[in-house]
Image (tube, rainbow, N blue to C red):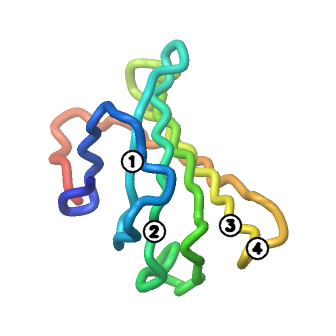
Amino acid sequence: MRINSLDVLVVCAIAPDPNPTFLGDSIGYWEEDTLVIDVVGFNTRTWLELLGHPHGEKLYVIEKFSRPDLNTLQYEATIDDLEYYTEPWTVPMNIPWVPGQELSE
């Protein structure tokens, strides 16, 4: 479940065929020091990003969050939707921590 585009994780199994929603159905788990979030169950009324790239209901997203050092949050999203794209692709992002910076959505 997502609230204001922030993930709220409920640790349980995802239904084999979840009811499609705007932001999908998420389940998170740890792989060593990395938080991994599997997301399925999207409807088709959203885009992947602001440029408007579409996706289908079979979209599968794997998000990974890790801290390589104290001042960096490493984020990675793998997009897997063979209905719209020929192969899965990954978007990596390093987010620096800035002392005194306020969090925003």
Distance between the alpha carbons at the discs numbered 1 and 4: 22 Å
Assess whether mark 4 and mark 1 are in contact (beta carbons under 8 angstroms): no
Is the residue marked by circle 2 packed among few (<14), some (14-19), or many (20+) residues within 10 Å?
Answer: many
Assess whether mark 3 and mark 4 are in contact (beta carbons under 8 angstroms): yes
Q: Amino acid at mark 2?
A: Phe
Q: Residue at x 53, y 84 (%)?
A: 51
Is 37 on the left or on the right of 77, as rendered?
left
| First along the sequence among labels 3 and 1 | 1
Q: Position of residue 10 (x, y in %)?
A: 26, 37
- Judged by depth in the image, the label closer to the viewer, 4 or 2, is 2
Up-down relation of residue 98 to residue 35 (above or below): below
Up-down relation of residue 77 to residue 68 (above or below): below
Q: Residue at x 52, y 37 (%)?
A: 64
Look at mark 4 in the image and give the residue it sits on.
85
| First along the sequence among labels 4 and 2 | 2
Give the structural element (helix, strand or loop) at label 2.
loop
Q: Amino acid at mark 3?
A: Asp
Give the structural element (helix, strand or loop) at label 1.
strand
Look at mark 2 in the image and give the residue it sits on.
42
Q: Amino acid at mark 4?
A: Tyr
Is the residue marked by circle 1 packed among few (<14), some (14-19), or many (20+) residues within 10 Å?
Answer: many
| First along the sequence among labels 3 and 2 | 2
Q: Position of residue 23 (x, y in %)?
A: 36, 65
